[in-house]
Image: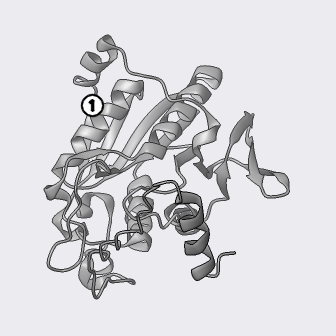
Amino acid sequence: MNIVVLVKQVPDTATERKLAEDHTLDRAASDGVINELDEYAIEEALLLKEKHGGEVTILSMGPDQATDSIRKALSMGADKAVHVNDEALKGSDALQTAYALSKALGTLEFDLVVLGSESTDARTGVVGAALAEYLGLPQLTLAGKVDVDGSAIKIQRQTDYGYDVVEAQLPAVVSVVEKINEPRYPSFKLIMQAKKKPVQKLGAADAGIDTAKVGLAAATTQTVDAAPAPPRAAGTIVKDEGDGGAKVAAFLADKKFV
């Protein structure tokens, strides 16, 4: 089974994030890390490989810095990677990203595409579904469990009322949630081996991407304004000098909470 895992480098949520003048995220202003949910996608792909054999390929679209996340994915046990990197892709929105990735996938042989259900920087959660539409493949979203039996794939998705069980024929696109598994930690040996694993570089032309359809100028959605959230007003501090309970009760009554 040939599995492709989509990996995105995102700004570290522990560091300050800034916007550029065009209101896009300034990715160079903060440290980049692998998108957390993508680690679960990698782990699930590796588990499927261990069970069914085959190969796991990492596919990532992003600037030069994305190499760090690609190497992290390879150190977890993936076999090789493809890095789509072109200045024309800068500022692409979720739908354009799905289009570009679909073109890149057209250069690969695969039975299954796995990705995290959303990224921590944009949280649109639509790339997997849009990608499946571009590829004309079944989409199985928000998977908490994945089973493959021959040419059939079945996922379990948690809902408010229990579970959905969804089945499809391979090839297919599956997005996963964090409850699906526990990602492994790369060993020192695998980290060193990852430095020697092949990473194929693809520009837009190499992948067959029409540059008129990608980038900020052609984006279907654009941020026209952005501002930091206003600071929270200081709350009321009640000092207990023997009458703290009465003061709290009076405050709640004044606000009509009681």
Of 139 and 34, the residue lying toward us: 34
As drawn, the residue found furthest toward the top would be 189
**Quadrant that contains the N terminus:** top right
Residue 168 visible in the current orientation: no
Q: Would you say residue 227 is visible in this rendering?
A: yes
* Place of residue 109 in the rendered image (x, y in percent of width and height, measured from the top left): 49, 44
84 horizontally vs 134: left or right: left
Who's the residue at 59% across and 26% down the image?
Answer: 47
Quarter holding the C terminus is bottom right
Residue 209 spot, x, y in % from top left: 32, 67
Q: Secondary structure at mark 1?
A: loop
Residue at the extreme front of the image, as rendered: 242
Q: Residue at x 55, y 73 (%)?
A: 251
Residue 217 at x, y percent in the picture = 24, 84
| Colour convention of the picture | one colour
| Residue 234 place in picture, x, y as percent | 34, 69
Q: Report which residue position mark 1 lands on.
A: 198
> Mark 1: which amino acid?
Pro
Horizontal side of 62 relative to 1 (left or right) equals left
